[in-house]
Image: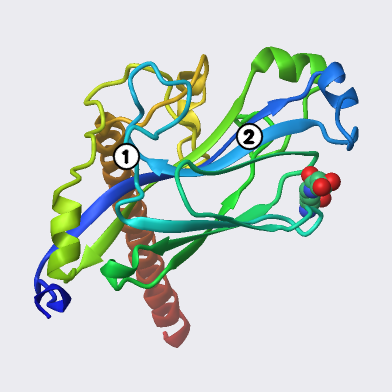
Amino acid sequence: MAERVRQRGISIFRPIVYGNTATVLTQEERNALSTPDHTHKWTVAVRSAASAPDSDIVGGADDLSYFIKRVTFKLHETYANPTRNVDKPPFEVSETGWGEFDIQIRITFVPESGEKAISFFHHLKLHPWTATTEPEIPPLEEALKIGPVHSWQYDEIVFNDPFQSFLQTLLAHPPTPLPKTKRRPIPFHATNPGSLEASKGGVPEFTALMEKEEAERLDVAKQAVIAETDKWRNILIEKEKELKKLKKQLEA
Ligand code: SLL
């Protein structure tokens, strides 16, 4: 069957985002729950990377069901039925709770793809980002003022040597490109603490500029590593010279 033929040498990817948005519950909202110890409502999701114009969610411009069959979110075992299978878009789970934990996310691809499922973790983030790594839990009033907390990761799902028919499906669904420049806040990430201020003030959005800037940060980091290596190599050379000199003095 022709459709089971692999297109050798082809590598094709689809950009996704995964992560969560969390909002503190007001006292009234908490009172209305059967679990009044819950402090937040949150949504964990897998979405296309580009956001729809004027959307109030991160990502999600494209429907990913042409290549994703199921997303499984494995919640903390304090939740009833912690393994949540989502078989149609939106691929997300909304819950209330009181604590942060690691969510295992498993993406199962459409059977025609012949691709193995992939699995990774997302740390459910409820409390606002801070410049330090110290977790800071603000009082309810303040948290309400700060607004929703966003924790999102951009990634690319790469298909190597795809089946010809699956490749046709992928090519028929080109992803919405990311905007070239910043139109909204930047999705904060702990690996880029300098972006804290730029991440505030609304629903964040991934842009192509972020990729460019990350490449630049990597370059700067690489240069710093090279400079540091050179510095220590020179110190080592000096110390070895000194050692030789002292040994000679001893022998004399
Ligand atoms: C912590 N290690 O101690 C984490 C555990 C558990 C989160 C967080 C409520 C579940 C329920 C909930 O938020 N569990 O009541 O259904 O912070």
What quarter of the picture does the N terminus occupy?
bottom left
Instruction: Find residue 152 and report its horizontal and vertical position in percent.
Output: 49, 39
Q: Label 1 CB, ligand 1: below 8 Å?
A: no
Quadrant hosting residue 39: top right
Q: Amino acid at mark 1?
A: Glu
Instruction: Find residue 53 and report its horizontal and vertical position in percent.
Output: 33, 19
What quarter of the picture does the C terminus occupy?
bottom left
Q: Amino acid at mark 2?
A: Thr
> How many marks do you count on the picture?
2
Q: Of the numbered discs in the image, which one, if any, rests on residue 132?
A: 2
Asked if residue 18 shows in the view, the reply is: no
Residue in the picture at 14% in, 73% down: 3
Q: From the viewer's perspective, is 89 left or right of 26?
A: left
Mark 1 to mark 2 CA distance (whole Å): 20 Å
| Mark 2 closeness class: few <14, some 14–19, many ≥20 residues within 10 Å | few
Residue in the picture at 51% in, 25% down: 196
Q: From the viewer's perspective, is 210 left or right of 91?
A: left
Q: Label 2 CB, ligand 1: below 8 Å?
A: no
What element does badge 1 sit on? helix
Instruction: Find residue 242 and report its horizontal and vertical position in percent.
Output: 40, 68
Residue lying furthest bottom: 251
231 or 252, nearer to the observer: 231
What element does badge 2 sit on? loop
Quadrant hosting residue 28: top right
Quadrant hosting residue 116: bottom left
Residue in the picture at 35% in, 39% down: 49
Tell me whether the residue at label 1 lies in contact with that at label 2, contact meaning CB atoms closer than 8 angstroms: no
Instruction: Find residue 181 and report its horizontal and vertical position in percent.
Output: 25, 22
Residue lying furthest front: 1
First in sequence, mark 1 or 2: give its number: 2
89 or 182, nearer to the observer: 89
Residue highlighted by disc 1: 214
